[in-house]
Image (tube, rainbow, N blue to C red):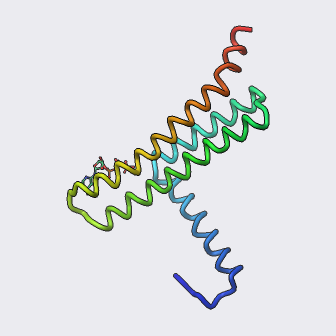
């Protein structure tokens, strides 16, 4: 909990610790987060094998971390909605579906980036 009198370095450390706890928790219980982690691993291995350049790596990294971040926000929002109401409510549905849509939109962009960067290199691996 909050303790405003502490050194800021301690507060920064605590914030970091809570964030790590969040990542560990999501890795254990959030199916979609686990799937994104597996995808990130596969894409990273492929990127190493296919020797993509520095700029291509930046696009891949932005895609991977963007999807993971949005997935974490989506999970947090789902919990916030569930705390706010246990009843079936149109606004609760909209909030959850909009957050899920944000993940989907970014994931689609990431897939396109993956295809643009890795697609031609994979094809030339098989057909050259
Ligand atoms: N309180 C609610 N009122 C109305 N619709 C809801 C409510 N809670 C969830 N929903 C809707 O029911 C569907 C399933 O929601 P649920 O909470 O099971 O999450 P989910 O989308 O399956 O994600 P996850 O599997 O990660 O929990 C979604 O369309 C969601 O918007």
Residue drawn 63% across the image and 26% down it: 116
Q: Nearer the viewer, residue 110 or 36?
A: 110
Which residue is pictured at 71% across the width and 79% down the height? 9
Residue 114: where, in percent of width, then height?
Answer: 61, 31
Closer to the camera, 117 or 45? 117
Q: Give the side of residue 59 with respect to residue 75, left or right.
A: right
The correct choice, above or below, for 95 with respect to 58 in the image is below
Image quadrant where one finds the C terminus: top right
The front one of 54 and 14 is 54
Q: Position of residue 76 (x, y in %)?
A: 44, 60
State the image coordinates of residue 88 (x, y, percent, origin top left).
20, 57
Residue 58 drawn above or below residue 18: above
Residue 7, placed above or below residue 17? below
At x 79%, y 37%, the residue is: 54
Name the image quarter holding residue 117.
Answer: top right
Toward the bottom, the furthest residue is 5
Q: Where is residue 80 in the image (x, y as percent from the top left)?
A: 37, 64
Q: In which quarter of the image is residue 13?
A: bottom right
Q: Furthest-left residue in view?
A: 88
């Amino acid at each position: 909990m909050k303790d405003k009198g502490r050194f800021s370095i301690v507060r920064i450390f605590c914030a970091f610790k809570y964030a790590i706890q969040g990542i560990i928790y999501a890795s254990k219980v959030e199916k979609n987060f686990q799937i994104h982690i597996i995808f990130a691993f596969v894409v990273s291995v492929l990127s190493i094998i296919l020797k993509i350049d520095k700029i291509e790596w930046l696009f891949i990294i932005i895609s991977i971390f963007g999807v993971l971040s949005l997935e974490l926000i989506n999970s947090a929002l789902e919990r916030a909605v569930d705390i706010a109401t246990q009843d079936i409510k149109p606004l609760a549905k909209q909030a959850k579906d909009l957050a899920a849509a944000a993940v989907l939109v970014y994931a689609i962009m990431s897939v396109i980036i993956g295809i643009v960067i890795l697609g031609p290199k994979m094809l030339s691996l098989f057909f050259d």
